[in-house]
Image (cartoon, rainbow, N blue to C red):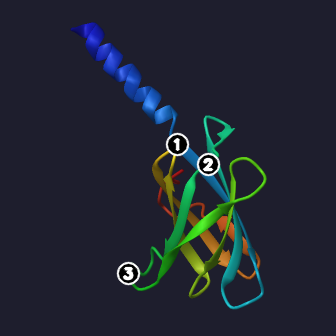
Amino acid sequence: MRWLLGLAMALSFEAVAQKAEARLDCIHTGKDFIYDCVIEIMRQGQPVTDLDVRMSADMPSMPMAHQVKPVTARATSTPGEYRAHLDLEMSGEWAVKLRLAGPLRDQLVLHYEFDERGARPVRGSGRPPRK
């Protein structure tokens, strides 16, 4: 019975280790609050390809007030890299939501600060970073 518990724990640790990670690189296009974003998706340090990636965003400081409709990110020629335009309503901190489907199914929430310089991960917001 103990070996079964040990096996279950080992499998649960393996499932956590295979969670997807993502990074955004967004450039302000110069038009309103529109950003050209490159999304890098990795699992265990390896790029994940053949995904259906849907990206949306909302402002944590104003829940339900500012929400961005989901857009589909398109794969680039670089493995694990996807591109989409993000049309925000204002600058500030946004929770960018990525829904992944295909060989990897996951939902990630990334907190980024958006302004005319582009986007940067939020640090020190009191919330633990989510990958």
Which element carries disc 1, helix, strand or loop?
loop
Out of 43 and 75, give the one closest to the viewer: 75
**Dots 3, 1 in contact, CB < 8 A:** no
The image position of residue 68, as x and y in percent, is 50, 79
The N terminus - image quarter: top left
Mark number for residue 50? 2
Residue in the image at 69% along x and 68% along y: 37
Residue in the image at 51% along x and 44% along y: 104
Determine the CA span between mark 3 and mark 1: 31 Å
Which element carries disc 3, helix, strand or loop?
loop
Q: Kindly identify the amino acid type of the residue bearing the numbered disc 3.
A: Met
Which element carries disc 2, helix, strand or loop?
loop
Reply above or below: 20 against 119.
Answer: above
Out of 34 and 51, give the one closest to the viewer: 51
Labels 3, 1: front one = 1
Q: Earlier in the sequence, mark 3 or mark 1?
A: 3
Determine the CA span between mark 1 and mark 2: 7 Å
Mark number for residue 64? 3
Q: Quadrant of residue 74?
A: bottom right
Q: Kindly identify the amino acid type of the residue bearing the numbered disc 1.
A: Pro
Residue in the image at 40% along x and 20% along y: 10
Crowding at label 3, few (<14), some or many (≥20) Cα neighbours within 10 Å? few
Reply above or below: 119 against 102.
Answer: below
**Dots 1, 2 in contact, CB < 8 A:** yes
Give the residue number, with chain letter if any, for mark 1. Answer: 103
